[in-house]
Image (tube, coloured by chain):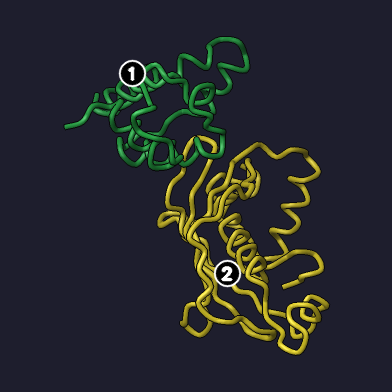
Chain colours: A yellow, B green
Amino acid sequence: MRLEYFQLIDRIVDINLADRKIRTEATVPTESTIFEGHFPGFPLMPGVLLIEAMAQTSGWLVVAVNRFERMPFLAAVKDAKFRTFATPGQKFSLEATLVHEGSGYAITKASIALDGKPICDAELTFRIMDFPSDEMQHKMRETAALVGFPAEVPANG
Amino acid sequence: MSSTFDTIANIIAETCDIPRDSIKPESHAINDLGIDSLDFLDIAFAIDKAFGIKLPLEQWTQEVNDGKATTDQYFVLKNLSARIDELVAAKGA
């Protein structure tokens, strides 16, 4: 994770378009100013950032399904459950499944696990829109390359 | 077997916490029931699942924005029911 860049995902492990599933990895940094406040003397990964990590995992899946032609924006979070503490240095396995692809929206179910044990899960709703600008689409492609967006998923539609 | 209108009225009542008996076939989802676009995504998801269809929300929005249709055609519930029946029939054709 590069928290200072709001990049919550380190690597895409696998995107399976047939099953509409994605797996990613992310390691919580051992040091961050975030942990100075959350909490002093007891550093915990904030739940909102765990949601963001699940949203980014889901987002790459939705981007792949849409062949990089459209962009998902987080619209709703439902049934978010934080089942245990997440702490600095932990290496997470994240998964997301596309539950429904509607007209202009998508629903995913996402989860984070540590060594097979559940950390958190949620149902996420995204609005699917055209990229607001060519610059954003270009930057997203750059970020996709950084996290290992697979070459076999066409990045140019 | 409940009618299409009953099914969507029940979905709206449950999704948006609107009293079921205040939801009429003549109700406009946006203007009368106060459903916003985000809540309507929940309704669309439930309708898509219940009827096995994909409500063409983007197409409808585009038609309204282009002046080719009015919101009444898609968001007055009796009209929405008719659109759903058409989509279900087209799926089975």
Q: Mark 1 points at which residue?
A: B82
Residue A105 placement, left or right of A38:
left
Among the 4 quarters of the image, the one containing residue B93: top left
Q: What residue type is labelled 2?
A: Thr
Q: Which quadrant of the figure contains the N terminus of chain A?
A: bottom right
Q: Which mark is residue A93?
A: none
Instruction: Find residue A131 and report its image quarter.
Output: top right
The three-letter amino acid code for the residue at tag 1 is Ala
| Residue B40 x %, y % | 50, 35
**Which numbered dot is residue A24?**
2
Residue drawn at x 40%, y 34% is B54
Q: B72 or A6, which is in the foreground?
A: B72
Viewed as shown, does residue A4 lie left or right of A155?
right
Q: Same chain for marks 2 and 1?
A: no
Q: Which chain hosts label 1?
A: B
Q: Which residue is at a point 73% across and 65% down the rendered structure image?
A: A7
In what quadrant of the picture does the C terminus of chain A appear? top right
Residue B56 against residue A157 in the figure, above or below: above
